[in-house]
């Protein structure tokens, strides 16, 4: 049993309270390896932004949970070494069982998501409540979810969005005791969020209705990559073939961040940045075979992307 407090990590409570009153969102950035971690911490230190480091089930399979947790622990010291200590949360992304959430709490995570959104409402409430009881006993924050995002979410996939029903949120929050609520308003995971010809638009009207029902309660948006055209162009210029990749327009995310949304999850945009950086080196220097020579530039591109997100989209810069 390790407490996140011994590791220098923080839960999301103070972070979210500040974000809600300040009208900005904290970045929820996923990481799977050292270069992503370095880029995230460098970007957040340079922009003086708090950060939520997210570990998905894919990340746990790929990188090993122990290594990822030690990396997050190291990130606390790394930020100080870079010259500015920032609040860092280590968060389980899309936890699907009570046992997994419990094991992460026991292992030093400071926040967990229990994603019961695919279950019937009553089952989602019951499962989320159990996770909250365990996590809160250890002062760990819990994110729940209501509504189903279209597309692939780890191993589960849904054809269409099931938007969050505003009439359920108050009851869910009150019965479960969650610290934040992920909602479905038209975002989705991955780089292909809208069909060509479809207007890329999220339902800010539903968000406003939810906010009215639970004023001041922290709302989370998953699937919030904007799939920047310049990154897609760079990937394609250097031999990639990403066709019709469409994300959430940044001005809509900016509007959401100014309202009740206090955490915005971004992973796919980071994948695009790293892929663009690596492809460029491979295309321009085919004789290069030192991983540092292609992972380094990819890391730099990722850092610049996240600095821009913090400053221009989420508004989390200068809030640490
Ligand atoms: O929730 C989705 C995240 O982008 C993580 O995806 O399970 O492939 O790591 P992953
Ligand atoms: P994107 O695929 O839009 O980056 O979303 C990531 C996410 O929601 C992680 O939980
Ligand atoms: Zn997600």
Image (cartoon, rainbow, N blue to C red):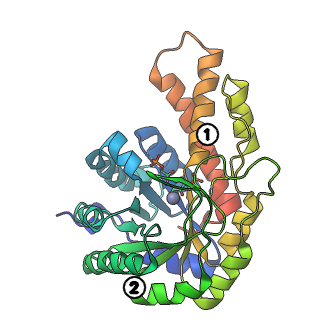
Count of marks overlaid on the render: 2
Q: Residue at x 57, y 45 (%)?
A: 270
172 horizontally vs 206: left or right: left
Out of 62 and 86, give the one closest to the viewer: 62
| Quadrant (top left, top right, bottom left, bottom right) of the N terminus | bottom left
User: Measured from the top left, where is residue 53 in percent x and y?
Assistant: 44, 57
Where residue 277 sits, quadrant-wise, is: top right
Out of 149 and 293, give the one closest to the viewer: 149
Out of 142 and 294, give the one closest to the viewer: 142
Q: Which is closer to the viewer, label 2 or label 1?
A: 2
179 horizontally vs 185: left or right: left
Where residue 110 sits, quadrant-wise, is: bottom left
User: Measured from the top left, where is residue 212 in percent x and y?
Assistant: 65, 89
Mark positioned earlier in the residue sequence (2 or 1): 2
Q: CA distance from mark 2 to mark 1?
A: 36 Å
Observer able to see residue 92: no
Residue sitting at the far top: 287
Packing grade of label 2 (10 A; few <14, some 14-19, many >=20) is many
Q: Residue at x 37, y 69 (%)?
A: 10
Residue sitting at the far left: 1
Relative to 154, residue 122 above or below: below
The label number, if any, that marks residue 286 in the structure image: none
Packing grade of label 1 (10 A; few <14, some 14-19, many >=20) is many
Q: Pointer 2: what residue?
A: 177
Observer able to see residue 288: yes
The label number, if any, that marks residue 272 in the structure image: 1
Mark 2 vs 1: CB contact within 8 A: no
Relative to 3, residue 72 above or below: above
User: Helix, strand or loop at disc 2?
Assistant: loop
Q: Residue at x 48, y 43 (%)?
A: 36
User: Helix, strand or loop at disc 1?
Assistant: helix
Q: Residue at x 44, y 60 (%)?
A: 85
């Amino acid at each position: 049993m390790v407490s996140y407090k011994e590791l220098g990590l923080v839960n999301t409570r103070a972070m979210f309270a500040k974000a809600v009153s300040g009208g900005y969102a904290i970045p929820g950035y996923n990481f799977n390896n050292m270069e992503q971690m370095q880029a995230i911490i460098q970007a957040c230190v340079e922009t003086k932004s708090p950060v939520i480091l997210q570990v998905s089930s894919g990340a746990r399979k790929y990188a090993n949970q122990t290594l990822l947790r030690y990396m997050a622990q190291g990130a606390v010291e790394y930020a100080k070494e870079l010259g500015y200590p920032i609040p860092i949360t280590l968060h389980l992304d899309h936890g699907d069982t009570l046992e997994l959430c419990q094991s992460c709490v026991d292992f030093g995570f400071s926040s967990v998501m229990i994603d019961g959104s695919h279950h019937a409402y009553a089952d989602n409430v019951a499962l989320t409540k159990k996770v909250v009881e365990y996590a809160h006993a250890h002062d760990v924050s819990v994110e729940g979810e209501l509504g189903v995002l279209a597309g692939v979410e780890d191993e589960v996939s849904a054809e269409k969005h099931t938007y969050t029903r505003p009439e359920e949120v108050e009851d869910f929050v009150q019965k479960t005791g969650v610290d934040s609520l992920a909602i479905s308003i038209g975002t989705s995971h991955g780089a292909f969020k809208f069909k060509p010809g479809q207007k890329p638009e999220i339902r800010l009207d539903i968000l406003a209705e939810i906010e009215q029902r639970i004023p001041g309660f922290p709302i989370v948006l998953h699937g919030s990559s904007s799939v920047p055209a310049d990154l897609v162009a760079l990937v394609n210029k250097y031999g990639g073939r990403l066709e019709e990749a469409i994300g959430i327009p940044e001005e809509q995310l900016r509007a959401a961040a100014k309202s009740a949304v206090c955490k915005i999850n971004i992973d796919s945009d980071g994948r695009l940045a790293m892929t663009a950086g690596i492809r460029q080196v491979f295309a321009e220097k085919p004789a290069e075979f030192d991983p540092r020579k292609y992972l380094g530039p990819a890391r730099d591109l990722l850092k610049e992307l996240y600095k821009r997100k913090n400053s221009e989209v989420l508004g989390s810069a200068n809030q640490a």
